[in-house]
Amino acid sequence: MADVKLEKVVKRYGKVETIHGVDLDIKHGEFVVFVGPSGCGKSTLLRMIAGLEEVTEGEVYIGNNQVTNWQPSKREIAMVFQSYALYPHMTVLENMSFGLEVTGQPKDLIEQRVSEASRILKLGDLLDRKPKELSGGQRQRVAIGRTIVRQPEIFLFDEPLSNLDAELRVQMRIEISKLHEQLGNTMIYVTHDQVEAMTMADKIVVLRDGNIEQVGTPLELYHQPVNKFVAGFIGSPKMNFLPVTVLSANSEQVNVLLHDGQKLSLSCDGRTVNEGDKLSLGIRPEHFFSGSEADISLTVDVDVVEQLGGTTYVYSDIDGQPVTIEADSDLELVKGEPMTFSFHLSRCHLFTADDRRLEVALSTPVKEEACA
């Protein structure tokens, strides 16, 4: 079974520590995506699993084997890189066969595996072409096919779609997801694009500055982010954060004041916040709607409007914080004019000054005197 386990894994370059004691369990057959901003350590972590980076401290397990110091060739893994890394003088068939040929595999076995990989990736009509005669998406499929023929226990993908245009990225996301369903192998995928993470993963690992911020399914991270960083990173467009001030708090509820004087009561454990604390009320762009028939209504000045056909995005500013609102596509919007949008408090998140999310059990608006 191709389980992957990391125990207290650390990576240092000289005195600089880039991965800080990471613990992670990946089950056999899972599609796990490492996601985070540039420099967060996601590719370094992947390369340590592959054996391409030395582990400074800690242990790496694949299946029942402790492979921390094993050579990459012994780990039963195959890696697809950001660059296609195809041999330009070889045909597609030769590129896919080469790895098996150098290990002395029988000719009939090579033909069988290449034929099967070509069928899965729809490369049958391209086998006689050289890389320069292929599109970017076709080259990436050949690079993936070269790993499939080896029949590894684990597939590792290091930002494989970043060199493709937007349409090809969508197409290849679908093809890689289908590939995972067909093969059932463990796949670990690195990207900085949270849309790729949300659409492809069984489990997402969100990294920041060499630490794991949260691990969970896409919807767990979307609905229950542990902190403001995860809340802002997962979801597109990103979550809005409205500044609020704590009026009072106890073990059962937190009462806050919005920038426009509206007072809200959120049912959550407020023992870790105090009167006067500056918090953030998180609400996603897609949870706004036009009109005022909801818990909270906000009037904003329309700064920029993006009309995408089926969706319209309104960009504005509230008390110095940028705000993005997803509006109905047929809503009439005029730049510079005020517009009222609403949302329900049940859709909100409350974040403390140190970015922790307070668990909101049930949210209701309250009259002004209730918060006095």
Image (cartoon, rainbow, N blue to C red):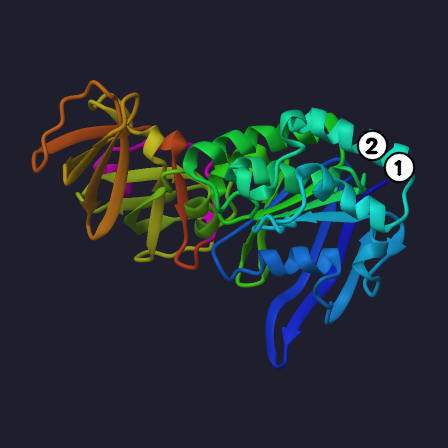
Badge 2 marks a residue whose secondary structure is helix
Q: Is residue 107 left or right of residue 361?
A: right
Badge 1 marks a residue whose secondary structure is helix
Q: Are marks 2 and 1 in contact (CB under 8 Å)?
A: yes
Is residue 234 shown above or below 346? below
Amino acid, disc 2:
Glu
Query: Which numbered dot is residue 111?
Result: 2
Where residue 210 sits in the image (x, y, percent)?
Answer: 58, 63
**Looking at the image, which is closer to me, 283 or 133?**
133
Instruction: Identify the residue at horizontal 18%, vertical 43% (top origin).
Output: 261
**Looking at the image, which is closer to me, 358 or 309?**
309
Which residue range is magenta in the image?
356-372
Amino acid, disc 1:
Lys
Is residue 50 shown above or below 298? below
Instruction: Identify the residue at horizontal 79%, vertical 58% (top origin).
Output: 72
- Residue that numbered label 1 is attached to: 107
Is residue 66 shown above or below 93? below
Instruction: Identify the residue at horizontal 73%, vertical 68% (top origin).
Output: 54
| Image quadrant occupied by the C terminus | top left
Based on the picture, tell me whether residue 358 belongs to the magenta stretch: yes
Residue 304: quadrant of the picture: top left
- Asked whether residue 219 is in view, the answer is no
Where residue 75 sits in the image (x, y, percent)?
Answer: 83, 53
Based on the picture, tell me whether residue 89 belongs to the magenta stretch: no
| Image quadrant occupied by the N terminus | top right
